[in-house]
Image: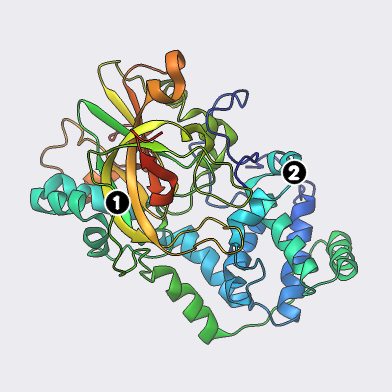
């Protein structure tokens, strides 16, 4: 973020001008239309994000029958809530337990379950995460402030094919009796990637 | 390509994971425009049959590593648009210079509400990768497998850190489209896809962390029975 800069144009990067030029020429030549671009940006800024996945998680925490179907048939069960589509037509849900901790990476690129988590954050696409998550996951989790005992097995899922993975974090203690909406607040994005526990945003 | 800068699993030297808890979806407006333009250009097949990932991997390693995520997208789409004659370098440079000199100007606008609705609706389309074809899976959960030691020149989904390693099939997912870029004449047919589990010690030897395993999705042609090799 560029807070502290009053001069709006001071920080404009060359890429911003290049992309403006590309957009202008592609529109001029009839290859794309402006409102399609507007619509996609808006969809991923507002409608397609981790608030969708949090609804899935909160439901699974409160409905054992839903949770069982979710773990067996992720895509179909998630689609009941309307979350299906690009980069998420085959979603597999991985359950974290007191003895098994799952975390997700895409070493080759940036594969990520868009319908439930939105577009991936920068760190997920970063060289540091992609290189280290597979060889030293415990050290990487420490970067996120998460220490896991050696007794807990860490399973790292490297998304190489068309399956997209989402983690079902453990339900936090003390959340009994909370409403669906309150529980959604306890399932931040990072807990569904497996670099954080549920319960803290 | 297979052994490119993008295949960074296990590499050292990239430092801590840089984490910003308040990161916006797009850091600057141009990232969102770039992202959306790439999606909108899909029907024009600008990148060709091998697609975005093969194009990204074809960037020079220094360019790949020296660019942000959406800068890479910008560079590959620009290269493809110029190579295919959709744009000329002269007009793109001139237009870029124009916007640098007229910072408050916005790109030309043309609207097509029907197309915009169709484009955004398509985001929610369920396009299963599973193909309903009659192919018998060679492996079953529980089978020990060894990953073939291959180094294809074209795009592959087989990361280098598992090549030659032994693992166990834990899931069979179905028969899916195969995305590797194959040499002329080689089969591009859909193949069974499995999830294979590798113990950390098999991949990293004594350097593995405690109690660690890797689960990786593999098309059948990546695998051979463990006892054969």
Residue at 38% of width from left, 65% of height from top?
A85
When the figure is inspected, residue A15 is found, relative to residue A196, above or below; the finding is below
> Residue B59, percent across and down?
72, 49
The chain holding disc 2 is: B
- B132 left or right of B106? left
Residue at (75% x, 81% y) in the render = A29
Q: Could you tell me if residue A167 is visible in this image?
A: yes
Q: Position of residue A53 (x, y in %)?
A: 32, 51
In this image, A180 relative to B23: left or right?
A: left
Give the residue furthest to the top: B206
Pinpoint the chain carrying mark 1: B
Q: Mark 2 points at which residue?
A: B63
Residue A98 or residue B149, whichever sits in front: B149
- Residue A6: quarter of image: top right
- How many residues crowd mark 2 within 10 Å: few (<14), some (14–19), many (20+)? some
Above or below for B15 versus A10: above
The quadrant of the rendering that contains the C terminus of chain B is: top left
The x and y percentages for residue A74 are 25, 54
Asked which colour scheme the image uses, the reply is: rainbow
Reply above or below: A8 against B148: below
What is the CA distance from the residue labelled 1 to the residue labelled 2? 40 Å
For the residue labelled by badge 2, is the local secondary structure a helix, a strand or a loop? helix
Point 46% across, 34% down: residue: B162
Task: Identify the residue shown where x is 40% and y is 17%.
Answer: B209
Left or right: where B105 falls relative to A156: right
Residue A75, placed above or below residue B84 = above
Find disc 1 in the rendering and name its residue.
Answer: B138
**Mark closer to the chain start, 1 or 2:** 2
């Amino acid at each position: 973020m560029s807070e502290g800069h009053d001069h709006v144009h001071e920080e404009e990067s060359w890429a911003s001008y290049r992309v403006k030029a590309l957009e202008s020429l592609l529109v001029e030549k009839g290859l794309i239309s402006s409102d399609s671009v507007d619509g996609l940006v808006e969809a991923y800024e507002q409608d397609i994000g981790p608030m969708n996945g949090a609804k899935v998680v909160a439901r699974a925490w409160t409905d054992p029958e839903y949770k069982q179907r979710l773990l067996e048939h992720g895509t179909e069960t998630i689609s009941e809530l309307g979350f299906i589509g690009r980069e998420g037509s085959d979603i597999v849900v991985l359950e974290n337990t007191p003895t098994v901790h799952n975390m997700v990476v895409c070493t080759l690129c940036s594969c990520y379950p868009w319908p439930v988590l939105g577009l991936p954050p920068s760190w997920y696409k970063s060289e540091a995460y992609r290189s280290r998550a597979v060889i030293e996951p415990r050290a990487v989790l420490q970067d996120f402030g998460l220490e896991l005992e050696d007794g807990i097995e860490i399973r790292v899922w490297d998304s190489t094919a068309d399956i997209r993975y989402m983690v079902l974090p453990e339900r936090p203690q003390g959340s009994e009796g909370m409403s669906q909406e309150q529980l959604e607040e306890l399932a931040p994005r990072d807990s569904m990637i497996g670099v954080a526990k549920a319960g803290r945003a | 390509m297979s052994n490119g800068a993008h295949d960074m699993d296990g590499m050292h030297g990239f430092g801590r994971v840089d984490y910003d808890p308040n990161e916006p979806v797009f850091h600057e407006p141009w990232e969102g425009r770039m992202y959306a333009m790439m999606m909108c250009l899909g029907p024009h097949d600008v990148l060709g049959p091998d697609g975005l990932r093969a194009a990204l991997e074809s960037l020079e390693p220094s360019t790949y590593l020296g660019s942000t995520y959406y800068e890479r997208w910008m560079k590959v789409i620009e290269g493809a648009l110029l190579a295919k004659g959709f744009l000329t370098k002269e007009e793109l440079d001139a237009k870029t210079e124009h916007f640098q000199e007229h910072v408050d100007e916005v790109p030309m606008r043309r609207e097509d509400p029907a197309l915009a609705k169709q484009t955004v609706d398509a985001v929610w389309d369920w396009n299963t990768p599973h193909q309903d074809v009659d192919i018998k899976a060679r492996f079953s959960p529980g089978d020990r497998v060894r990953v073939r030691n291959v180094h294809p020149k074209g795009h592959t989904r087989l990361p280098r850190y598992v090549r030659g390693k032994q693992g166990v099939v834990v899931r069979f997912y179905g028969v899916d489209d195969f995305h590797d870029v194959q040499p002329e004449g080689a089969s591009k047919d859909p193949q069974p896809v499995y999830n294979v589990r590798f113990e950390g010690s098999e991949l990293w030897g004594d350097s593995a962390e405690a109690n660690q395993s890797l689960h990786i999705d593999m098309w059948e042609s990546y695998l051979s029975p463990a006892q054969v090799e």
